[in-house]
Amino acid sequence: MAATMMPGGPVADAVFADLLPRSEKLIADGNTPGLGTILVGDDGASARYVGMKMSKAQELGWTSPHLHLPQDATQADVVAAVRAFNDDPAVDGFLVQHPTPPEIDFDAAIMEMAPDKDVDGMHPVNMGRLALMMPGPVPATPAGIEALLAFYDVTVSGREVCILGRGTTLGRPLALLLSQKRPTANAAVTVVHTGVPDWPRYTQRAAVVVAAAGVPGILQPEHISPGAVVVGGGVRYEGRRLLPDVDERCEEVAGWITPRVGGVGPTTIAMLFRNAVEAAERKHAAR
Ligand SMILES: NC(=O)c1ccc[n+]([C@@H]2O[C@H](COP(=O)([O-])OP(=O)(O)OC[C@H]3O[C@@H](n4cnc5c(N)ncnc54)[C@H](OP(=O)(O)O)[C@@H]3O)[C@@H](O)[C@H]2O)c1
């Protein structure tokens, strides 16, 4: 029997339904949130992603200051853009769209961000807060996956979640998040990677498998148990073509699965806005 789909759109809608009154209150109090975006270079997909985030911010009545640096921007140019948003009181949160051109050290640019304004939740201070369960922006994609599983009533508490990939954007922070002591987490998390050549042994026994490798088709039907919950986080782009980690034949074995398009992506954007609202609320509460 084909698996039940878990699209990210309804999850994102639910997150925005929660954020809307909070955003409206901030605006009514004269604290209109500002979401800044920095785009470096001419990558079409990156420009589209930034455009989507800006129009969502505008739809909410926020300001959306944008800095577009040319393809030949230097590291110093990117750092200057980051510092400009750090210092701008009208910007509550901002992001540097990934990927940047190869000449730019993306991690070094992120290091320059004011951690409280980091809506992607990727600054080392925010990774540290995640590890220590301190409040702050949570890495957006892992937070979106937790929200997605909770939305579809997939219990992870007390069950094994196997994450294929230990990357810093997805696998590693997701493992930290889902092992936290909270009702929608509390999982027995296993993380597998290239250092575990027999990784299917672990994915086969897990109740929930999250593919986070960025290797098209790496997760095959024989790697999961019948009825398992499968979340496809990893993707690779070939031009405009999106190649997911999860082979589509997994849909015949899994019980629940994210669609190949419109799964984790919409929840990532929703979490980025949640981080921005929380940053604005924290800033104004502290006044
Ligand atoms: N949908 C979204 O909104 C969204 C957002 C963010 C990221 N992503 C995607 O998530 C994926 C992961 O990103 P990331 O930055 O966290 O990861 P990353 O740094 O690219 O790391 C990939 C991980 O996968 C493991 N891996 C690669 N090939 C493998 C293989 N053949 N067997 C076993 N393990 C293998 C690697 O193992 P080693 O550590 O041993 O090398 C590594 O831990 C990417 O595809 C990215 O595009 C999606």
Image (cartoon, helix red, strand yellow):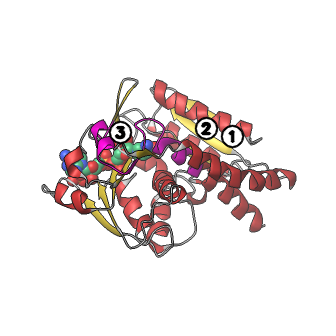
User: Mark 1 — residue?
Assistant: 57
Query: Mark 3 is on which residue type?
Result: Val
How packed mark 2 is, by other alpha carbons closer than 10 Å (few <14, some 14-19, many 20 or more), is some
Assess whether mark 2 and mark 1 are in contact (beta carbons under 8 angstroms): yes
Check residue 235 in the rendering and tell me which mark sits there, or answer none: 3
Label 3 packing within 10 angstroms: few (<14), some (14-19), many (20+): many
| Whole-percent x, y for residue 210 in the image | 35, 53
**Percent from the top left, x then y, of residue 162?**
30, 60
What whole-number distance in Å separates the C-alpha atoms at marks 3 and 1? 25 Å
| Residue 268: in magenta span | yes
Distance in Å between CA atoms under marks 1 and 2: 6 Å
Magenta stretch bounds: 244-271
- Ligand 1 closer than 8 Å to the CB at disc 3? yes
Q: Is residue 22 left or right of residue 125?
A: right
> Given contact means CB atoms under 8 Å apart, are the residues at marks 3 and 2 in contact?
no
Q: Image point 67% across, 33% down: which residue?
A: 55
Query: Badge 2 is on which residue?
Result: 53
Q: Residue at x 35, y 44 (%)?
A: 234
Instruction: Give the secondary structure at mark 3.
Output: strand
Q: Amino acid at mark 1?
A: Ala
Q: Residue at x 39, y 53 (%)?
A: 170
123 horizontally vs 32: left or right:
left
Secondary structure under tag 2 reads helix
- Number of other residues with Cα within 10 Å of mark 1, as a class: few under 14, some 14 to 19, many 20 or more: some
Query: Alpha carbon of mark 3 to alpha carbon of mark 2: how far?
Result: 20 Å
Where the C terminus falls, by quadrant? Answer: bottom right
Disc 2 residue type?
Lys
